[in-house]
Image: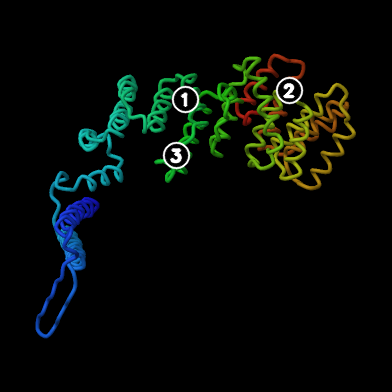
Amino acid sequence: MKMILGAYVFVILILIAFISILSYGYGVGYVYIYWREIQIQTNIWVLFIFLAVLSLCLQLIGIVFKRYLNREKRKSETIIEFNNLHPYEQLAVIWLLDAAEDRKEFIQQVFAQSSLLNSVVNSQIYIMQGGYSEALTALNDSNIMAFELAEIQRIQIYLAQNEYEKALTHLDFLSQHELSPWLKEIELTYKNRLTYLWGEFATQSPWLYLHTKSFGDLCEDKKQQWLKQILSQFDQATFNDLDALRQRYARLKEDLQSRSYEVRVLWLKVLARLSDMSEEYENLALQLLNEKFSSDVFYLWFQLQMLRQNPDYVYVEQKINQWEDRYPFMPIFSFVKWYLYMATDRENEAEELLSLYPDDVLMNYLRVKSKLKHQEDLVQLLNTIFESNSNYLEIKI
């Protein structure tokens, strides 16, 4: 359609110039049409404009009618071969069936003439085949206007090759880079892709994520996965990693209330492993317990109280009774009371608790632990076994 309009404009300009030359010194002329009692009197310019508009309208009507006929014909046509489809139809089928790997030759052929996307498309095909070196080489020839697309693929390649330092460099840069104007209409999709890549990076290299400059946003699921990776790899953290973790929490502390309950519980489990953040640990635990009761959160709060240099047993018991009145028949209260009674030399009361909740894993843990008195090596082994199945809870009491 654009080509037709462009051709008409070009021809009209030539005719205007031609008529202008012929009319120079002679005026606009006079045209008289008489047909079946109809008389039309005008000049050459009006006639020319009328014929040009009439010709264009007839041409457009012809194109629309032809397209309609072709569309109706396609509806009744029997497709026997995939190659008989139009290129855009073939691309649509490949997209719908996620069959890019099977039809890579066709895709490369379609985009071979595209100076904008040819290198990026070739790189993506190499990535699907696992040819990361070839993919990076292809991206070296990518068009500067496709910079964001090429960078996204580089990040994808570095993550696949476990080159997390390089991935972080490109992610940081891309997150602060102003989006090209031609991508503005799909900016949301572009940002979602960046969020996905940040999530992959954070879960694959959780400690390095703490050293990023821009802290790319993570979706809810990836936030939880990242914190779980931090907990599972806590023993691998360096001093700088732990310091970065403290700074990260300090930055988001004010905004933590807007996070999901699950994310805040995971942050609490992280704080439980940072001995110098007991105040933040207790504040967050109480905040969570006031919002909704959780056995894990309650145990972490109780453990913090019991590990103090001079535990306030009266205060702790009062709080336990308050919560037990509010949330009755929960095994966690019997579990923590056993520790409290043992710490306050009420062994008979503690022994009575061991008969409660015979099918509960926490009480079963206590029943085994009570049989291992004064065998610290076996108790430590029991703690290790229990911690590996207790949702990232450390047993310190």
Q: Position of residue 40 (x, y in %)?
A: 16, 77
Q: Which residue is mark 2?
A: 396
Q: Is residue 287 above or below residue 79?
A: above
Q: Position of residue 374 (x, y in %)?
A: 77, 16
Question: Quick one: quadrant of the C terminus?
Answer: top right
Front-lying residue, 87 or 38: 38
Q: Quadrant of residue 365?
A: top right
Q: Which residue is mark 1?
A: 170
Q: Which residue is mark 3?
A: 190
Amino acid found under the numbered disc labelled 2: Lys
Question: Quick one: quadrant of the N terminus?
Answer: bottom left
Q: Is residue 110 left or right of residue 172?
A: left
Which label sits on residue 139?
A: none
Amino acid found under the numbered disc labelled 1: His
Q: Is residue 217 above or below residue 168?
A: below
The answer to which of marks 1 and 3 sits earlier in the sequence is: 1
